[in-house]
């Protein structure tokens, strides 16, 4: 039973354009969401997070949007750069439920930014 | 480099052998988490430890797997009598507090032959 789903295994965009990565979740206890970036043979690197009390969080080129009613979040990268090419993981935790340390990950989306 | 250090990076074991994976958290971090990534899958939580204590091992297989985080030294994930299905990337993460972002190590890729 996948509680965090990233339905697009891969995404290809042109340099300078916007990349939109999507994530859906099923567990209504989740109240904290994170995006991680992962290069081959390396560990995941934290990118950006959002609490369920917000619907948007922005950090430079990265913006995460949260739609609680739809149980959906998305990561926008603009403008996209070739160095952004990596696997992006969506993750969620239930902080109010006391499981704030236990992240549930999606399967990831491979983003390729073409020069 | 004060990041999370895992070793070895690659480990090959024959079926039935033991695998020991080590994780040194970032300086000042006392919370350690182990995750496993099977091929084509996302990372799955295994265990959460603080110094000398296992806080949550709900993601650990019931048999053959154990974890520790002693007062001195790295955290160890131990897999006894490995089987082919144990082949995966094992990631360790650490944080300074339970509510703060965790930083991941580069992982140990275990291959069971």
Image (cartoon, coloured by chain):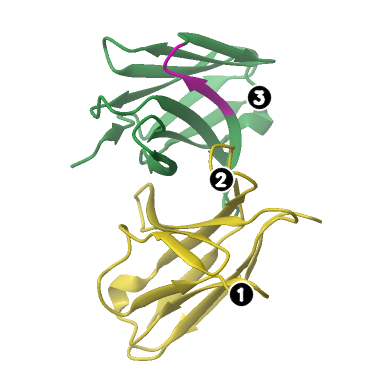
The label number, if any, that marks residue B18 in the structure image: none
Residue nearest the observer in this picture, A61 or A101: A101
Q: Quadrant of residue A21?
A: top left
According to the image, label 1 marks what residue? B8
Within-10-Å neighbours for mark 2: few <14, some 14–19, many 20+: many
Q: Quadrant of residue A63?
A: top right
Q: Which residues are magenta?
A: A48-53
Name the dominant secondary structure of the magenta segment: strand
According to the image, label 2 marks what residue? A44
Q: Position of residue B39 (x, y in %)?
A: 36, 57
Residue nearest the observer in this picture, B33 or A46: B33
Q: Secondary structure at mark 2?
A: loop
Q: Nearer the viewer, mark 3 or mark 1?
A: 1
Q: Position of residue B90 (x, y in %)?
A: 47, 63
Chain for disc number 2: A
Hue of chain A? green
A52 in the magenta segment:
yes
Name which residue lies at 30% across and 29% down: A7
Chain for disc number 3: A
Precedes in sequence: disc 3 or disc 2: 2
| Callouts 1 and 2 close, C-beta under 8 Å | no
Examine the rendering and report whether any part of residue A18 can be seen.
yes
Measure how far apart labels 3 and 2 are at the Cα level: 24 Å
According to the image, label 3 marks what residue? A115
Q: Position of residue A26 (x, y in %)?
A: 23, 27
Chain for disc number 1: B
Examine the rendering and report whether any part of residue A41 can be seen.
no
Hue of chain B? yellow
Left or right? Give the position of B78 relative to A77: left
Quadrant (top left, top right, bottom left, bottom right) of the N terminus of chain A:
top left
Instruction: Determine whether A4 is above or below B49 in the image.
Output: above
Q: Secondary structure at mark 3?
A: loop
């Amino acid at each position: 039973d996948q509680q965090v789903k990233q339905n697009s295994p891969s995404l290809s965009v042109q340099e300078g354009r916007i990349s939109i990565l999507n994530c859906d979740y099923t567990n209504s206890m989740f109240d904290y969401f994170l995006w991680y970036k992962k290069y081959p043979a390396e560990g995941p690197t934290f990118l950006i997070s959002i609490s369920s009390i917000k619907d948007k969080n922005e950090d430079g080129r990265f913006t995460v949007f949260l739609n609680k009613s739809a149980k959906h979040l998305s990561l926008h990268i603009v403008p996209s750069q070739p160095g952004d090419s990596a696997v992006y993981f969506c993750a969620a935790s239930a902080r109010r439920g006391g499981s704030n340390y236990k992240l549930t990950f999606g399967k990831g989306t491979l983003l390729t930014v073409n020069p | 480099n004060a990041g999370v250090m895992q070793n070895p990076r690659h480990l090959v074991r024959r079926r039935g052998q033991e695998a020991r994976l080590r994780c040194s958290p970032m300086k000042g971090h006392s919370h350690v988490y182990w995750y496993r990534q099977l091929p084509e899958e996302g990372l799955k939580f295994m265990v959460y430890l603080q110094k000398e204590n296992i806080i949550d091992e709900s993601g650990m297989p019931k048999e053959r797997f154990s974890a520790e985080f002693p007062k001195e030294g790295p955290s160890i994930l131990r897999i006894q009598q490995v089987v082919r299905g144990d082949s995966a990337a094992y990631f360790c993460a650490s944080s300074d507090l339970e509510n703060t972002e965790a930083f991941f190590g580069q992982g140990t890729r275990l291959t069971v032959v």
